[in-house]
Image (spheres, rainbow, N blue to C red):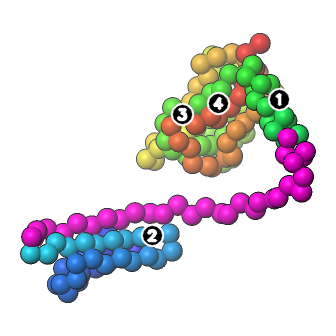
Amino acid sequence: MDIKEIQNLIKFVAKSGASEVKLEMGDIKITIKTGGEESRGETTYVQQIPVHQPAQEQTAPASQPVATNLATQEAAVSEDAKYVTIKSPMIGTFYRKPSPDKPTFVEVGSTIKAGDPLCVIEAMKLFNEIESEISGKIVKVLVDDSSPVEFDQPLFLVDPS
């Protein structure tokens, strides 16, 4: 649904005299509210609903495997505590390569130093090269290539030793 269609829908609802119309089409939800006699304005809310794939849940037959799983998670967290997390400085799309035909900036096991490029984050058609602020070895890449990232989202784990 493009902006012209939305504008035409708003005009149609305003002329019809309806006080509120809700429309859901796929991942787009539109609510149009028009004021009655007490207010002469109209308010339009356009909200895009994120589409999430439902996670398949597994039920544990006994409580012992769950306890083992928790112990494993705690061990992983304590192991990751010795690593430095490089986080996204902005919202955008994460790319591991400078362009599709070039090799990735870094791989797991790569040794980096301060100032080395790690990835590119595209924000509003601008490609921002993200450089390392520390020296060390890449232990883990936490984001898939071409994935959207949020501000302060962990991107890489680095072993500074």
**CA distance separating discs 3 and 4:** 15 Å
Residue 106 seen in the figure: yes
Task: State which quarter of the image contains the C terminus.
Answer: top right
Residue type at numbered disc 1: Ala
Q: Closer to the camera: disc 3 or disc 4?
A: 3
**CA distance separating discs 3 and 1:** 24 Å
Give the magenta part as a residue range. Answer: 38-67
Query: Is 96 inside the magenta-drawn segment?
Result: no
Choose the circle earlier in sequence order: 3 or 2: 2
Name the residue carrying label 4: 118
Residue type at numbered disc 4: Leu
Name the residue carrying label 1: 75
x then y, percent, for residue 98: 62, 39
Q: Quadrant of residue 23?
A: bottom left
Label 2 secondary element: strand
Choose the circle earlier in sequence order: 3 or 1: 1
Residue type at numbered disc 3: Asp
Q: Residue furthest front?
A: 63
- Relative height, residue 122 to residue 55 (above, below): above
Q: Residue at x 84, y 45 (%)?
A: 66
x then y, percent, for residue 156: 68, 31
